[in-house]
Amino acid sequence: MLRVDSLTKCFDSGAAVSAVSFEVSKGEVVGFLGKNGAGKSTTMRMICGVLDPDAGDARLQGRSILTDRHQAQRLIGYLPEGAPLYQDMNPLDYLAFLGACHGLARHALRHAMDRAIADTRIGDVAHRRVASLSKGYRRRVALAGALLTDPPFLLLDEPMDGLDPVQKQAMRALIRRMSAEKGILISTHTLEDVATMCSRALIIDEGRLIADLTPEDLARKHPEGLEAAFIELISTPQAGRS
Amino acid sequence: MMADLAFVWTGIKAGWWREIRAYFATPLAYLFLAIFLFTLGAFTWDVAGFFDTGAADLTPFFTWHPWLYLLFMPALAMRLWAEESLSGTQELLLSLPVSLPGLVIGKLLAAWSVAGLALVLTFPWWISVNYLGPADNSSIALSYAMSWIMAGAYLSLGSMMSALTRSAVIAFVLGVLGAFALTAAGWPVVTTPVAQLFGLSAAETLAAFSFLTHFETAQRGVLEVGSLFYFLSVISLMIALNTILVLYRRRSGR
């Protein structure tokens, strides 16, 4: 279980995330929705230990990201926004580097790399420098990195960005296939992804969680369906929300 | 406690491996080695008059080390942390289960390894000296070792500066400025006017912080434990500051 408890972060420009709490259990794919700058990435970064919260905590299988950081981080596969990679490495080097950071022994590393490369279908570019890869491939290399240790939790920040329709379909299939064994949190702008992959949707606006419901319940909120319901929800002024 | 040490060790290995690959995957390390060796050779040969001393020792060679390190070591260290921030890979690095001090040490050790390789590649000077006459090889070995440790002090300063900014160029400029201050503090051009203005003790205090002062005995092949301790203290202090700066990045999200 991933338990996010009152995570709060303020920057110079104001509160980015205010007391956000939710849970993600094994077997769930949770869509994390919101406008640009709503606080999705900031929340994810705090859960992964990339950013220290001002208040609150995130616990992964009971391990706090604040007090038991490294053990908690071992349980997470994180795909950061924009899928940053070391440009001078090839995918094999990159995965080996991540394996070294996770302290994987040689045999386990080889096995993990083979599986991640097969799952994300990057075998044909495994020896090419990251700098020469297309955006779609880079995203898949970064995803392979997140999947490397087969962690129980995945945090994917806009994983579909930059993928063509065929790649998107493959990504959805992969996420669905993994969902039985993992707890997955996906931030996305594409509501179609929520309808096809997610068992639950979290909606965040101006740093506050404003809805936690199933995609079906969200769609029922507006006669025109999911997208209209989402837009209506985030357009309601904060004061008007219960 | 043991688990914490394991994360530090993993961080050192991962940081070292990552940076060594980065140095040699691009022309950076090769360029560095070529230009450093050429410049050191030119200074030793021409400016210091290697053959004019009439003695089979490497003093003219070691004299230039602090002055060349002042420029070359910040160049080697400038991208260590600045680039992580600029390219967004810091986001990835901070999400991995490795200790930050471990990463700081590992990255520094990678740059330090390249500096060590540069020193090893100066072996033709050592061979020349031995060819010219009987040389005191244990003194030469000591000068080399101390030079390498001093290089680590310059690099740790450069790495710390690199954690201050997202721009490798700014990191380089800050590194050179910092290195210049720490070198020139013992330079007669600086100490003489300081002695005239504030007295001899002020000049001596200032010079006590200079890399030049601490390297002076070592370049003659004499080990001064205090100087060794000084360089190691500078390195430890810089590693600590570097770690604090990266922790600040995690705090501020920059």
Image (spheres, rainbow, N blue to C red):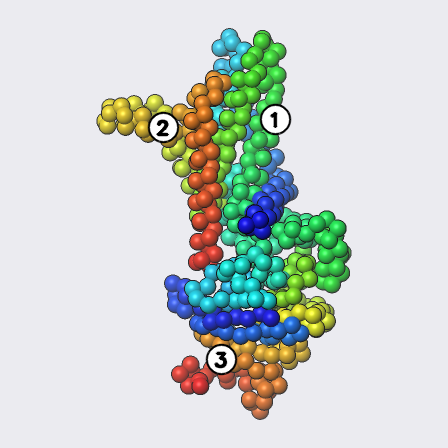
How far apart marks 2 and 3 lie (CA) works out to 62 Å
- Along the horizontal axis of the image, is A90 left or right of B63? right
Residue contact between numbered discs 1 and 2, judged by CB atoms under 8 Å: no
Q: In this view, does A133 lie above or below B235?
A: below
User: Would you call the spot at circle 3 few (<14 residues within 10 Å), some (14-19), or many (20 or more)?
Assistant: some
Q: What element carries label 3?
A: strand
Subunit of mark 2? B
Q: Do the residues bearing badges 2 and 3 touch, measured as CB atoms within 8 Å?
A: no
Does any portion of residue B191 appear in the rendered image? yes
Earlier sequence position, callout 1 versus callout 2? 1
**Residue beneath label 3, please?**
A210
| Placement of B54 over or under B14, stated as above or below | above
Q: Is residue A138 something one can see in this rendering?
A: no
Estimate the x, y position of residue B124 in percent, counting from the top left: 61, 20
User: Could you tell me which secondary element the residue under label 2 belongs to?
Assistant: loop
The nearer-to-camera label among 1 and 3 is 3
Location of mark 2 (residue): B208
**Whole-percent x and y of residue B40?**
53, 24
Q: Provide the residue designation for mark 1.
A: B121
